[in-house]
Image: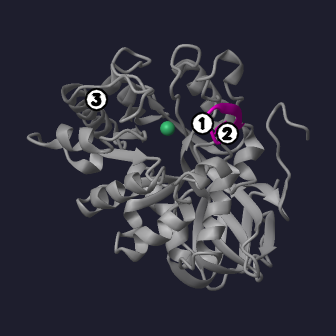
């Protein structure tokens, strides 16, 4: 493997448009960007990649993935399987944040952390949230604050469930305590310390968050509600939350059933929120990869299960640009700089000197993903995986 990669003639979206640049990678970092670099007389091993036909963008940051699987709400046989490395890389995801979910009994934080380390070894960057849907939170050390301070990969809490029949129906006081612990842990560890919030289809929508914030020093920005495109009412509640300074996340994994029953397609939700004047830095897309997606018949009876797909993140990004005419910079922001900033991942989600060398080459002609570089290593080339997880077919 070469120690240097020179990306030539790249049209850079960082995610802001930076025009044509040459970009030099080494040691897993972007070490230089500029107009002209000449390695012709160098003894250093250099791999040159001509990027003329491509946009060069940051690798995607997927803020919510059940990478050890999730679900199980229909009994043991409905527990969804683990994510594999190429599920992420073939979707352009170079940073993934793992969470538990409904089940924190047969799925554990120790298992989640082990999987995060496995994926990191296989080549992408991973982080986790402590806790699950449940309050009081399950933690690794016995304390949310201690988990954030003492465990490198733990950067926040969640997804805590509210307004959902699977939620543990937390009181206002309980939500406050979780947010306070996450804030202090995040500050002391130099991490985001946000609380990821699973928002269900219940009537109260975001009311529990407003109640938690009111009369305290907590800010709405501490909470990061997801599934805000679940239905029209939830979407509108999300817009109100964003107008008050909050950040909101739209889920890209979906089923035909959900779309027929009022779910707002994530790409459409992003386009509409931007058109309503919400800042791109307050809007993110995440895949909810490897979550269970129940399929119902017209009578509402459970017919089967599908599994959330990380690849839906890339499809939604592409739909946002091609179908919903979202400018490339803004669509990219929702899957790179915005989630990285919200989560406090300062070396992620942007192309600039000293950032991690997590990059995509996207074909200008049709926005198909061509090349994925994670921590300076080429994972996907010409749309095909060239590096595989330990138990994937190589
Ligand atoms: Zn959820």
Magenta residues (range): 295-307
Please determine whether, in this image, residue 189 is positioned above or below residue 262: above
* Residue found farthest to the left: 215
Depth check, mark 1 against mark 3: the one in front is 1
Residue located 82% across and 47% down the image: 387
**Residue displayed at 36% across by 69% down:** 279
Nearer-the-camera pick, 365 or 358: 365
Mark 2 falls on what kind of element? loop
Question: How far separated are the C-alphas under marks 1 and 3?
Answer: 35 Å
User: Measuring 65% from the left and 68% from the top, which residue is drawn there?
Assistant: 318
Q: Earlier in the sequence, mark 1 or mark 3?
A: 3
What is the CA distance from the residue labelled 3 to the residue labelled 2? 38 Å
Q: Position of residue 346 (x, y in %)?
A: 44, 54
Q: Quadrant of residue 259?
A: bottom right
Q: CA distance from mark 1 to mark 2?
A: 5 Å
Question: Can you tell which mark lies on residue 297?
Answer: 2
The reply to whether dot 1 and dot 2 touch (C-beta < 8 Å) is yes
Q: Which residue is mark 1?
A: 300
**Residue 313: horizontal and vertical position, in percent?**
63, 55
Quarter of the C terminus within the rendering: top right
Asked whether mark 2 and ligand 1 are closer than 8 Å, the reply comes as: no
Secondary structure type for disc 1: loop
Report crowding for label 1: few under 14, some 14 to 19, many 20 or more residues within 10 A (C-alpha): few
Question: What residue did someone put label 3 on?
Answer: 178
């Amino acid at each position: 493997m070469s120690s240097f990669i020179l990306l030539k003639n790249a049209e850079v979206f960082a995610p802001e448009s930076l025009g044509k640049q040459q970009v030099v990678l080494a040691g897993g970092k972007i070490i230089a960007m500029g107009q002209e670099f000449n390695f012709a007389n160098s003894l250093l091993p250099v791999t040159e990649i001509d990027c003329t036909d491509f946009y060069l963008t940051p690798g995607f940051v997927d803020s919510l993935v059940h990478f050890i699987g999730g679900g199980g709400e229909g009994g043991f046989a409905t527990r969804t399987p683990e994510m594999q490395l190429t599920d992420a890389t073939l979707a352009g995801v170079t940073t993934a944040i793992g969470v538990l979910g409904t089940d924190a009994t047969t799925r554990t934080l120790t298992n989640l952390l082990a999987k995060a380390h496995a994926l990191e070894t296989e080549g992408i960057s991973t982080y986790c949230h402590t806790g699950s849907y449940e309050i009081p939170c399950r933690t690794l050390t016995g304390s949310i604050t201690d988990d954030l301070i003492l465990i490198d990969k733990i950067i926040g809490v969640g997804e805590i469930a509210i307004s959902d029949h699977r939620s543990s129906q937390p009181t206002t006081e309980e939500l406050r305590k979780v947010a306070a612990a996450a804030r202090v842990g995040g500050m002391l560890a130099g991490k985001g310390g946000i609380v990821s919030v699973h928002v269900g289809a219940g009537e109260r929508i975001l009311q529990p968050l407003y109640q938690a914030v009111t009369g305290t020093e907590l800010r709405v920005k501490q909470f990061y509600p997801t599934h805000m495109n679940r239905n029209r009412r939830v979407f509108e509640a999300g817009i109100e939350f964003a107008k008050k300074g909050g950040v909101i996340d739209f889920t890209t994994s979906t089923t035909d059933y959900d779309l027929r029953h009022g779910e707002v397609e994530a790409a459409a939700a992003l386009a509409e929120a931007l058109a309503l004047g919400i800042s791109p830095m307050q809007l993110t897309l995440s895949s909810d990869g490897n979550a269970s997606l129940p399929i119902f018949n017209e009578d509402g009876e459970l017919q089967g299960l599908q599994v959330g797909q990380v690849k839906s993140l890339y499809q939604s990004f592409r739909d946002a640009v091609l179908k919903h005419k979202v400018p490339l910079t803004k669509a990219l922001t929702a899957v790179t700089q915005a989630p990285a900033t919200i989560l406090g991942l300062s070396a992620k989600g942007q192309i600039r000197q000293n950032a991690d060398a997590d990059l995509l080459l996207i074909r200008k002609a049709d926005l198909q993903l061509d090349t994925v570089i994670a921590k300076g290593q080429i994972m996907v080339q010409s749309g095909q995986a060239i590096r595989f997880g330990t138990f994937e077919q190589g």
